[in-house]
Amino acid sequence: MITRNATINLDAIEHNFNIAAKLAPQSKVIAIIKSDAYGHGLIPVAKKLPGAEAFGVSVIEEALELRANNISQKIILLTGANTIEEIELCAQHDIDVVVHHRLHLELLSKQKTNRLISVWLKIDVGMHRLGFDGDEITEVFEQINQIKTVRKPIYLMSHLPNADRMNDPTTEEQIHIFRDHVEKFKVEASLAKSAGLLAWNQSHFNWVRPGVMLYGASPLVGKIGADHDLIPAMNFQAKIVSVRRLKAGDAVGYGGHWRCPEDMIVGIAGVGYSDGYPRHARSGTPIMVNNNICQLVGRVCMDMLAIDCRQTPDVKIGDNVLLWGEQLPIETVARHANTISYELMCHVSSRVKTIL
Ligand SMILES: *Cc1c(COP(=O)(O)O)cnc(C)c1O
């Protein structure tokens, strides 16, 4: 019996990709598969998306792994190459680099082979994480264009910090700033991640960069994947390993912070924070047992957690528990754990994953 299991539905990822592509029909798609495709499996996800014009990853190891598995599409190293060795590897394996710091100009000029590298010049429009300021961009653009091993034309990109809030006024301003730069240089450009793709049509430009929506979750505050016809690709399941009949006032779990309000049935599920279920999920977080919505109670343990089973009183050992998935939005669980769906997806332990 498989006692805990996160199944990955690759058909759902393909479906979600098609939705992303349709929402931006004029744009090419960079499927963002960094961090092991948000915990869904780098190579299986890449192979499932032959329609993606490009893939985005955050570390060179992932880019090289894609090439070693015969992925032939464009690959973009989103955090840039920070050593001469990484630049050489990018040139050798035809991996695009994001240039967001003056160090990168120096490294690109020092490349020893004459292989060409494609460059995405990153402008900071307000995120203040990576990128050049608006007033230095013209000079940097010209400098990059003088480097012989940089493939011309280069691309422009930026990142929106507040696009998950609809009607956010700073986002409109930042799209405007980016558009001004794009018009000045007349090159292809990319701004939108999932939130921009879903909520800000003016942010689409030539290339869109969906990440979390490919996996079936919504990045927008107060929304879930189903609101955009997305299908959650991860179904995180476990089994009931014990059933307890407890008395009113009985404390449940470490610290005894949660007490039974009446005589009741508590089910113990064989899954915990070592599998990737968030320890900070509060009592009251929804969990499904036998397709009934129940609630987490007490503190999550390493390999177990307790569930108020008053909604499914004939629960028994071996019954099915769903932590999140198609029938229970990951966004809802994330909200109860003071986090976002992204973190929950990434943290599911690889030892419990099965790819369908
Ligand atoms: C992670 C990332 C994305 C994707 O963001 P989502 O919100 O998951 O769609 C896009 N662009 C860059 C540069 C990223 O780092």
Image (cartoon, grey):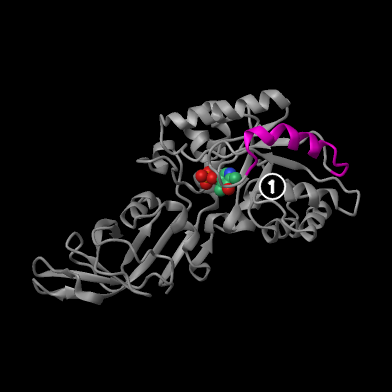
- Which residues fall within the magenta stretch? 131-149
Left or right, 14 with respect to 238, comes to right
Point out residue 347 in the picture as x, y percentages from the top left corner. 47, 63
**Vertical arrangement, residue 310 with respect to residue 31, above or below:** below
Q: Secondary structure at mark 1?
A: loop
Point out residue 323 in the picture as x, y percentages from the top left corner. 36, 60
Quadrant of the image where one finds ligand 1: top right
**Vertical arrangement, residue 192 with respect to residue 282, above or below:** above
Q: Quarter-wise, where is residue 204 in the image?
A: top right
Q: Which residue is mark 1?
A: 101
Question: In front: 96, or 316?
Answer: 96
Question: In front: 229, or 167?
Answer: 167
**Vertical arrangement, residue 232 with respect to residue 208, above or below:** below
Residue displayed at 55% across by 40% down: 193
Point out residue 165 in the picture as x, y percentages from the top left corner. 41, 36
Q: Quarter-wise, where is residue 178 in the image?
A: top right
Tell me how many marks there are. 1
Q: Quadrant of the N terminus?
A: bottom left
Left or right, 86 with respect to 228, comes to right
Task: Look at the numbered disc 1 and say if its residue's Cβ is closer than 8 Å to ligand 1.
Answer: no
Question: In front: 298, or 324?
Answer: 298
Main SS of the magenta part reads helix
Q: Quadrant of the C terminus?
A: bottom right
Point out residue 284 in the picture as x, y percentages from the top left corner. 23, 58
Q: Dot 1, crowdedness within 10 Å: few (<14), some or many (≥20)?
A: some
**Vertical arrangement, residue 215 with respect to residue 141, above or below:** below
